Amino acid sequence: MTQEKKSKENKYNKLICVGKLVKFLNKSKFQVKSYTEEPSSIKTYKNLYLSGKYSIKLSDQLKGKKGSHFIAEFNSINDIDPSTLEDDYIYTRRSDFAVPEDDEYFIYDLIGLSVKDNNDLDIGTINMVYNFGAGDIIEIKKEDAELIMIPFTQENFPEVSLNEAKIIISNKLLIN
């Protein structure tokens, strides 16, 4: 198995944080904050884990939904004192995510990509992706360690290749 294939498999096996247990209510009920785009989709993941080690299952009914918060009951929290789980994080495997549409990407998949110009010269790497409400912003850590932020648009980033672990930035943005 090639190192590249091994690395890709490891990335898809990694646990991704999809929510948080905000408040213990009683028995197996918690107030949950979902980090997913559609908060109720947290219950659709095949495998959920607390602290990356306890396997859990949410009941089908999510109640009291307000924004990204809702009340969830766990069908399986065996051998764990639920009151000790408050403020714990909920994870799922990257491999359990649905396949994104064309020209859609998971933030997790973009972080760490090499940023190259149109001539394939190294500019830096994607350090983080933000969204403050007006669209995604790519934070690039340049070769000289300077951080720059650029809106994630087709015009600014005409090519994204997850297979090659790179993203192309428009040379127009690099004039300054």
Image (cartoon, rainbow, N blue to C red):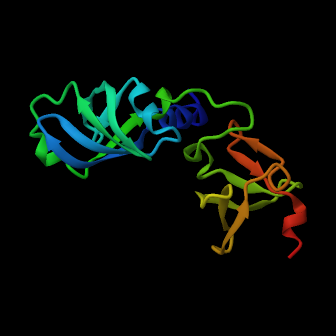
Q: Nearer the viewer, residue 66 or 110?
A: 66
| Numbered circles on residues, count | 0
Q: Is residue 100 above or below residue 112?
A: above
Is 142 positioned to the left or the right of 26 in the image? right
Locate residue 1, reporting x and y percent. Answer: 55, 26
Q: Is residue 141 above or below residue 5?
A: below
Camera-nearest residue between 109 and 120: 109
Q: Position of residue 167 (x, y in %)?
A: 74, 49
Percent coordinates x, y for residue 15 in the rendering = 40, 39
Residue at 22% over, 24% down:
75
Residue positioned 25% across, 37% down in the render: 53
What residue lies at 43% left-to-right and 25% top-to-bottom? 44
Identify whether 115 is placed above or below 159.
Answer: below
Horizontally, is 71 left or right of 46 in the view? left
Q: Quadrant of residue 151?
A: bottom right
Res 133 quadrant in image: bottom right
In the rendered image, which quarter is residue 144 located in? bottom right
Say which of 90 and 172 sits in front.
90
Residue 78 or residue 134, whichever sits in front: 134
